[in-house]
Image (cartoon, rainbow, N blue to C red):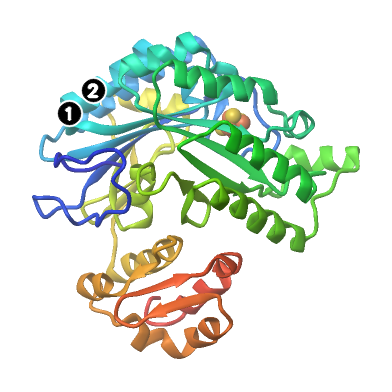
Amino acid sequence: MARPETSNDPGSGLRDPFDSAQGRPNTGIYVHIPFCQAICNYCNFNRGLHDAGLRERYVDALVADIHNSADPTVAADTIFFGGGTPSLLEPAELRRIIQACRDSFTVAVDAEITIEANPESSSEEKLAAFRQAGANRLSVGVQSFDDEELRRLGRLHSSRAARHAVGSARQAGFDNVSLDLMMWLPGQRTADWLVSVETLIEQQPDHASLYLLEIYPNAPLRDEMARGGWSVAPDEDAAEMYLGGLARLDAAGFEQYEISNVARPSTRRSRHNLKYWQEGEWLGFGCGAHATFRGERWRTVSGTQDYIGKVSAGQDVRLDRRVLDEAERLEEALFMGLRLAEGLDLARLHQHHGLDIWARYGPDLTPYVSAGWLVHEPGRRLALTRNGMLLATDVMSVFIGGTVR
Ligand code: SF4
């Protein structure tokens, strides 16, 4: 997920992705690290158990893949290491991968370089080495500050370890720290959730992401819930958790800028993730990574060994490469843009897609405006209210079946 070499300070908030001096969208670089020390019982990400030898060969493949894709006309201003557990990388490996990106693309001097970390692999020494290696933003997978909730999820860390990781990050020199929390956990009541939110606030992060736990059909967590007699709270409680958590974050001075994300006002929004929500472009490296770049989309082979083997053999690791048609681009612009608190920029959509959103969808959207779920500022923007964010899927369904598809 990347961008242009124009000077973008890591904290500039929402930007128009089409604002680069070259007239091309800013680009991001996503790097997938598929290793974990243990597999959490709810996880369906592309990941596997950590093996040091495999990790070393994977990093060699990543570096080779990035070099094979070299194009100095690509101006990037974000690099995001996601996983899996990227903090299982050795700092020297992180440095190598960042250097490969800098050698291959025009990466801004002040690029936002994020590494996701789990508390159990985040010693102060290691975080300091990551910082030295070039990472300048840390995203910590806390998920909960309640030890029993963490145990139910199969997480390896404790609440204390999570709090310690934030302190270590600050000591290591990270001035841009994001914390992830999950709500609607098995056995979690609204009051429990709010304790986690308050504990998060006490850690004084720069950014936080609040996710609703989704338990996929065959997740081992389902069996464990049955055995343990744990259930998730009713739907109304999930809404209460969401609104209550955000109200506390508001009061603590955070600004919600996306359905699931808050940041210190105008300074610490995730520049990388904004590319997904603002019709940006990104390259993806590593197994299972996706890319949307210069009007095309593709994914990378999902198996770790397959990826290493194909890169080593000089074979193409990209699959399903295709040109995005206008209907897909517009649909994505509407669905992703409506996730932002600032909502859809109607003038920009008209400029880029030639569509007057209100003229096309106004009759179907008006009931949502009347119900207080949507705000419409004619000619300017269309945005979900916070209550509307709870019903985002319903509102977005208006865009399905019209001219978009
Ligand atoms: S640490 Fe994250 S990626 Fe790894 S198994 Fe747990 S949820 Fe999945």
Q: Is residue 211 above or below residue 356?
A: above
Instruction: Report the amino acid beneath label 1.
Output: Ser
- Considering every residue shown, the one lying at the far bottom of the view is 363
Q: Quadrant of the rendered structure where residue 69 is?
A: top left
Nearest to the observer: residue 84 or residue 297: 84
The C terminus lies in which quarter of the figure? bottom left
The verdict on label 1 being within 8 Å of ligand 1 is no
Residue 8 screen position, x and y as percent: 21, 41
Give ligand 1's quarter of the image.
top right
Question: In the shown orientation, is residue 6 left or right of residue 370?
Answer: left
Residue 350 screen position, x and y as percent: 24, 76
Residue 262 screen position, x and y as percent: 49, 48
Q: Residue at x 72, y 44 (%)?
A: 193
Nearest to the observer: residue 74 or residue 232: 232
Q: Is residue 238 above or below residue 215?
A: below
Q: Quadrant of the rendered structure where residue 95 is?
A: top left
Q: Residue at x 33, y 48 (%)?
A: 298
The N terminus lies in which quarter of the figure? top left
**Please, what secondary structure does the residue beneath circle 2 have?**
helix
Using the image, tell me which numbered label, if any, was put on residue 100.
2
**Please, what secondary structure does the residue beneath circle 1 have?**
helix
Instruction: Report the amino acid beneath label 2.
Output: Ala
Q: Residue at x 34, y 80 (%)?
A: 357
